Image (spheres, rainbow, N blue to C red):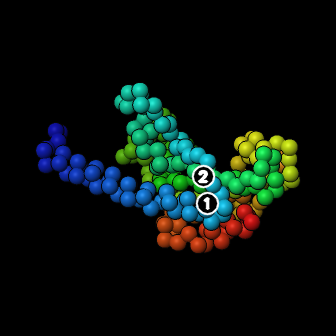
Amino acid sequence: MAMTLQSAERLIDQLQQAHRISVAFYRRMLPTMDHIATELNCEFKSWEPLHSSMPRKSTKPSTTWAWDYVPLLASNHLYSRTHGEFAQPSDVGLYLCLYVDQGFAPGERQKYGFSGEPDAVSLPVGKAVLQAWIYRPIVASDMSFDELWFSAADPELGVDQVQQVADNVNAIAFEWPLAEIIRDTGPMLETLKLHTA
């Protein structure tokens, strides 16, 4: 059945509203993550989309996943605090992983039988969460903290205790519902400060 002009206009109106709501959300969420990092005396290093790519401007958009054009749907924001060229126990690595829709995560897609690009309409909506992953050197090292940290394994989520994830790196991971973080970062900061002091 062909789409009527009225249906097409309604679709465009919904699309415009969705984009504006997304922009308003990111105008609030991105400074919130920076605030969390600042409260932990960490500085921004980089960010990247999780589970999707950021196509180059020379890439024909129709040849990549449509999901690639919503990179903040699932994204990783990296902050750190270091004290010199070599790793010290006071150094901190902080990943803030923003999942607006955890249904897009590879494990969730596989659970629902999706291989390749998932259909946006039929993929079940997942939880909206903010995860925090904290990495710390155990003792001083003659290696840089980045060398230690980036070679470490990920801690297991939900364990709520420090785990040794490499020879000289401890880590812990937490997860909060995104709505709680938008409402109040206080409880999250209290928890994170216990592991970054």
The disc, 1 or 2, on the residue closer to the chain's N-terminal end is 1
Q: Residue drawn at (56%, 63%), measured in percent from left and top?
A: 35
Q: How many marks?
A: 2
Q: Would you name the residue on which mark 1 appears?
A: 37
Q: Residue drawn at (52%, 62%), measured in percent from left and top?
A: 32
| x, y percent for residue 107 | 57, 45
Residues under numbered marks 1 and 2 in contact, where contact means CB atoms less than 8 Å apart:
yes
- Give the amino acid type for the residue marked by disc 2 in the picture: Phe
Work out whether 147 lies above or below 164: above
Please rate how many residues cluster around mark 1, counting C-alpha atoms within 10 Å: few if below 14, some from 14 to 19, many from 20: many
Given residues 54 and 131, the one toward you in this image is: 54
Q: Residue drawn at (53%, 72%), measured in percent from left and top?
A: 184
Q: SS class of the residue under badge 2?
A: strand
Taking the view exactly as shown, the residue that stands out farthest to the left is: 5
Q: Which mark is residue 103?
A: none
Real-space Cα distance between discs 1 and 2? 8 Å
Given residues 61 and 67, the one toward you in this image is: 61
Quadrant the C terminus occupies: bottom right
Side of 117 where 20 appears, left or right: left
- Give the amino acid type for the residue marked by disc 1 in the picture: Ala
| x, y percent for residue 141 | 86, 47
Q: Is residue 126 visible?
A: no
| x, y percent for residue 66 | 39, 38
Quadrant the N terminus occupies: top left
| x, y percent for residue 173 | 68, 57
Q: Would you name the residue on which mark 2 appears?
A: 44
Quarter of the figure with residue 157: bottom right
Q: SS class of the residue under badge 1?
A: helix
Work out whether 114 lies above or below 26: above
Q: Is residue 36 visible?
A: yes
